[in-house]
Image (cartoon, rainbow, N blue to C red):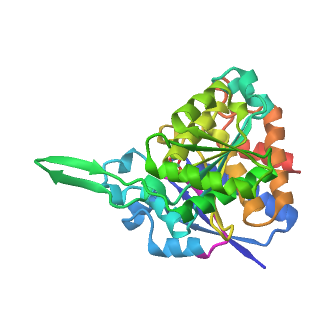
Amino acid sequence: MTKRILCLAGDGIGPEVMSAALQVLQRVIEQYQLPLELEHELVGGASIDAQGTPITDSVLKKAASADAVLLGAVGGPKWDQLPMEQRPEKGLLALRKHLDLFANLRPATVHPALAEASSLKSELVAGLDLLIIRELTGGIYFGQPRGVREENGERIGYNTYVYSETEIKRIAKVAFETAQKRNKKLCSVDKANVLEVTRLWREVVQNMSAEYPDVELTHMYVDNAAMQLVRYPKQFDVVLTGNMFGDILSDQAAMLTGSIGMLPSASLNAQNQGMYEPCHGSAPDIAGQGKANPLAMILSVAMMLKYSLSEAKAAATIEEAVYKTIDGGLRTADLNQDEWISTEEMAKAVINQLI
Ligand code: IPM
Ligand code: MG
């Protein structure tokens, strides 16, 4: 049965890394005779320019009926002045909400050959393998009411931080089950000393731990978690947290690995339908210069094959090819400013390792 993939390259370096990753995917499709069909659409600023909106209803519909979505990146200075509702980021948030992609998996792993690239001492990060599980369709990103109102002659901005027990339980279940398949350690991150919503979060997660006696559960306040991530990151296996804390901590964790240009992510719903995207943004400062690292996008393709398309073998082939390429010493500009190869050359190098 043919499976359908919707490709949304987006803005900035999005189209460059997408094109690189699709070359790799194309080769793997041939190698393994994968029954995959690719379709391309616009999202973010590209969609604003062409269609006047960060994502059209018809693209949302296509995404919902696809087996998986690949996304490059959205946003850029060109669209920064637009009102909130019309910004490129809204396209991404609409996709997450429309497809109910509540579970965002953001691995931060440090390949031994790249430990030197980290801003931390290499012994602190060499062999690091942690996974942040971020709730992606709730919390303060989506809570109502929200807005800016006038009161007593001044403007007041407000958002609502809200989680229901159901929302907490479904993401915690993913976290416990994922921890069971890894090193069986789960750290739930909250701000239960100040925010009622995260007090409830902590209570619900704690109560669920009885069903997972093999998983060692700890709780940590988010400020401490930010500190521990740079003090001794290897203490973590799976980190579970809400939407906004997860946004912040995942950027921090990504940087431990030397470059955010290496990290893929998966956003899944209850049917394991998923959207796959690099953790990095659209990097408008380097767009069009061939400097973007395509490996995060290529590794996102591998995650897609594994989680949504049940093609674990093809996924492993891509991952191995990426690591062999890195071991061979080839680097894009984010990892070595003195001696770097282009986005396109990196894709070719990975393809060479596939054979
Ligand atoms: C991310 C990004 C997005 C987020 C933006 C682009 C809306 O920072 O995926 O981490 O805040 O979730
Ligand atoms: Mg972010």
Boundaries of the magenta span: 65-74
Q: How many marks?
A: 0
Q: Is residue 18 visible?
A: no
Q: Position of residue 255 (x, y in %)?
A: 61, 33
Residue 11's place in the image compared with 56, above or below, is: above
**Quadrant in which the N terminus appears:** bottom right
Asked whether residue 137 is drawn in magenta, I would say no
Q: Position of residue 111 (x, y in %)?
A: 77, 35
Q: Position of residue 281 (x, y in %)?
A: 53, 45
The furthest residue to the right: 355
Q: Main secondary structure of the magenta part?
A: strand
Question: In which quarter of the view is residue 263 placed?
Answer: top right
Going 83% across and 59% down the picture, which residue do you hit? 312
Residue 229's place in the image compared with 120, above or below, is: below
The furthest residue to the left: 153
Asked whether residue 71 is drawn in magenta, I would say yes
